[in-house]
């Protein structure tokens, strides 16, 4: 369960809302039961339930724990907004796989009309799915879900990463594994590399978009000889990078 970072200084932590209901009704928690609680950023603790009352579960911190479930390579999945609820699937599965952030964006062939007025509701839902997936996967952090970026903003964001892999369905040369493996192998011990994988919409990327991404610092890569659905590509790319890093 995740609680606010401010609560971590105290000996007791209070869990409210949906999480409290889940502990009480679904997990049938009772005083004395052990729970792992994380601040979602950098700390995690073994706790023991002190009391359960309607709407609130109070736990005592027993022991601060090492953050052992987070990979050294921090993978951000940038995904051109897909139709329907496919982004929910991407967020859920890539959170389980180990991605640390999601950046939805709009590109030339994005089909969905993004309605900014509905943004806060959609973001709220994406973040809820992300938090639940992080809990089930025993992540130490809850990955960030950003509000959608324009294509230009996405290109500008590339400079914040150590490597950006532009997954291009028409790339016949360099494959992601061949690009990422030597880079990962060459990382100094203890270095936390920041990587972004960029995935296109149902209609794919245009050659001009690929050129613009390369000019902005990305490396165009393929993900094998088959064309993956847009909701599958991010999972494959994230898993490939984390596999190469042994995490
Ligand atoms: N029409 C299908 C759909 O509706 O999902 C396939 C979409 S595919 C063109 C969407 C994106 O997935 C591409 O723009 C690319 O980012 C990624 N992708 C899929 N297969 C790939 C491959 N073999 N190599 C690299 N990227 C790939």
Image (cartoon, grey):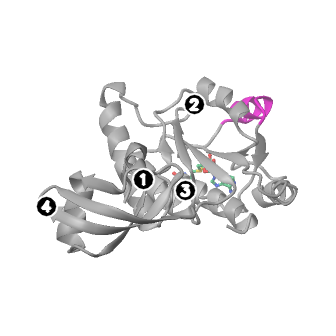
Residue 247: x %, y % from top left: 67, 67
Q: Quadrant location of residue 1?
A: bottom left
User: Can you identify the residue that label 3 sits on?
Assistant: 229
Q: How many labels does the image show?
A: 4
Queried whether the magenta region covers residue 215, the answer comes back as yes
- Disc with the residue nearer the chain's start (3 vs 1): 1
Q: Earlier in the sequence, mark 4 or mark 2?
A: 4
Ligand 1 is within 8 Å of the C-beta of the residue at disc 3: yes
Residue at mark 4 to residue at mark 1: CA–CA distance? 27 Å
Q: Is residue 84 visible?
A: no
Label the magenta part by its dominant secondary structure: helix
Q: In this view, does 161 lie to the left or right of 37?
A: right
Mark 1 to mark 2 CA distance (whole Å): 27 Å
Q: Earlier in the sequence, mark 3 or mark 4?
A: 4
Check mark 4 vs ligand 1: CB closer than 8 Å? yes or no.
no
Give the mark toward the camera: 3 or 4: 4
Read off the magenta span: 206-217
């Amino acid at each position: 369960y995740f609680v606010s970072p401010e609560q971590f200084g105290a000996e007791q932590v209070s869990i409210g809302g949906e999480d409290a209901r889940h502990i009480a009704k679904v997990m049938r928690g009772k005083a004395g039961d052990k729970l792992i609680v994380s601040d979602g950023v950098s700390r995690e603790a073994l706790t023991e339930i002190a009391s359960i009352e309607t709407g609130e579960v109070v736990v005592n911190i027993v022991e601060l724990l090492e953050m052992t479930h987070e990979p050294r390579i921090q993978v951000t999945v940038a995904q051109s907004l897909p139709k329907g609820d496919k982004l929910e699937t991407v967020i859920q599965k890539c959170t389980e796989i180990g991605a640390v952030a999601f950046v939805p964006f709009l590109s030339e062939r994005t089909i969905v009309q993004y309605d900014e007025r509905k943004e806060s509701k959609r973001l709220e839902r994406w973040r809820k799915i992300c938090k639940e997936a992080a809990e089930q996967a025993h992540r130490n952090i809850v990955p960030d879900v950003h509000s959608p970026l324009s294509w230009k903003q996405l290109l500008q964001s590339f400079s914040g990463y150590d490597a950006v892999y532009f997954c291009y369905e028409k790339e016949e040369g360099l494959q992601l594994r061949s690009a990422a493996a030597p880079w990962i192998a060459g990382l100094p011990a203890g270095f936390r590399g920041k990587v972004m994988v960029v995935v296109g919409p149902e209609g794919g990327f245009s050659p001009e978009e690929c050129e613009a991404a390369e000019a902005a610092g990305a490396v165009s890569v393929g993900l094998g000889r088959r064309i993956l659905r847009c909701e599958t590509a991010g999972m494959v790319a994230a898993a490939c990078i984390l596999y190469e890093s042994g995490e």
